[in-house]
Structure formats: structure tokens, C-alpha cells
Image: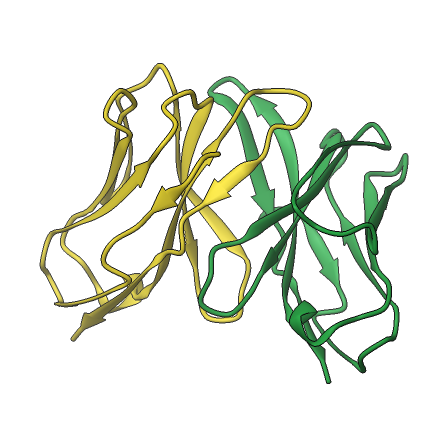
Chain colours: A yellow, B green
Amino acid sequence: KQEVTQIPAALSVPEGENLVLNCSFTDSAIYNLQWFRQDPGKGLTSLLLIQSSQREQTSGRLNASLDKSSGRSTLYIAASQPGDSATYLCAVRGEVGANSKLTFGKGITLSVRP
Amino acid sequence: ETGVTQSPTHLIKTRGQQVTLRCSSQSGHNTVSWYQQALGQGPQFIFQYYREEENGRGNFPPRFSGLQFPNYSSELNVNALELDDSALYLCASSLKTGSGEKLFFGSGTQLSVL
């Protein structure tokens, strides 16, 4: 059974700091890994999608890496801003087709102080 | 904007009642999945529909059921509501892209069971 862990549960940093959010998963047989952002009481916004054959993806100030063999992914946020304050969720997807689903971590709640 | 719309946004029910939640996704998104997110937790997979047939289910009892329609809309029905059913219910539709199959989430329905 796939399990996804995100530690710590919460993080507070001053504006402008570069930071890394960690995600680990127990079963390396994944199809892809996705990072999401969630604002309080809202749905999920996809940030980055990494296929199992890829090592990293970049979008603006965000960079996500994937080390499938060790069951780890990181989300790097450069020059953090107060608008980055949200919960960041990591999710891995199993086999394509029937029974494919996302398994989520509990998320990391990030607070960026002005 | 993900192109996935959920209704209603908020709902209050009492224990034992039945509820229907609705989701509308973009044309061409032929796979829809539903997730339950309790407060402070990551979303948990309920089930997935592909071309109007259920083709994957998480660890949820049969009183959670669903439908998918040819117009890419879908429903989540929950019978005999329990207090623990209080959660944010998220609908996600899938689209195959050049970089893989990506999930797009709606903003969710916040269900409170009293």
C-alpha cells in the first residue's frame, strides 16, 4: 500500500527566503508525481507534474525534483513571497488505466512572513 | 481556472440524510474521480469513473456511490450520512497531455453533517 509523507506539517519563513519542501513515498512503482497548492477551504491547484521517467520540472520560481529509486521528491520555491502562503500537497499516481489513483500526503502549511 | 465546476459549494445536512454532489468537467475529460478531504488531512480517493463505468474504488462503503454522464458531468451520492462524512469533497477530471495524464480539480463542496 502506497504511503506518502510530508514533514514538517507546517513551516514559517521570512519573505525572500529560498525553501525546500520534502515528500517521501514508500512504493517506487509510480506513474507520476504531482505537487499541488491548496488555499484554505479551496480546491487543489496543480503546480508541477513529473513523470516517473523525469528527474525534475520547473515553472517560474518553482522547481520540483524526483528521485524515484529513493522514494523522494522536493519542491523548491525561490525568493518566497507572502502570496506563496498556502498548503502544499504532494501526490503520487499508481498505474495508468483501471484503478489508477492519486495518493496524497497530508500537506505542508507554509506561511511566508512579510 | 481548471475547467472543473462543483456544486453546491457548501451544504449542511443532518445525520441519516442523503446527499448528491455534482461535478462538471471539460469536454474530452473522460475520466472523473472523487476525493474526500477531512480537515487537516490529504484527500482520500473514493472512486473513479471512466466512460460512465466505475473502474476503481478506494476504502469507502457502498453508501458512497456515483454516476458519470455522457456530457462529462458526474455525481457523488452519499446515503445514510454520518457525522464523520463531514469533509471537503473534491472532483477531479483527467486529460492526457504530451507530458502525461494530469488531474484538474474543482474547488470542492464543503459538506457539514450535524
Decide if residue B1 is in sight here. no
Q: Position of residue A52 (x, y in %)?
A: 38, 19
Seen at 26% across and 33% down, the residue is: A72
Q: Residue furthest top?
A: A53
Q: Is residue B103 above or below residue B37?
A: above
B56 relative to A22 in the view: left or right: right
How far across and how far down the image is residue A114, in percent? 16, 75
Q: Which residue is the extreme one toward the bottom?
A: B114
Residue B85 x, y percent position in the rendering: 69, 68
**Depth order, front residue of B2/B107:** B107
Dividing the picture into quarters, in which one does residue A67 lie?
A: top left
Q: In the picture shown, does residue A103 fall above or below A105?
A: above
Residue A4, position as x, y percentages in the image: 38, 42
Name the residue located 48 percent from the left edge and 50 percent from the top edge. Answer: A45
Q: Is residue B104 left or right of residue B28?
A: left
Q: Residue, x 10% and y 61% (percent of image)? A: A16
Image quadrant in which you'd find residue B73: top right
Figure check: B30 above or below A11: above
Instruction: Report whether A71 appears left or right of B11.
Output: left
> Which quadrant is home to the C terminus of chain B?
bottom right
Q: How many marks?
A: 0
Query: Could one spot residue A4 in this view of the protein?
Result: yes
Depth order, front residue of A95/B80? B80
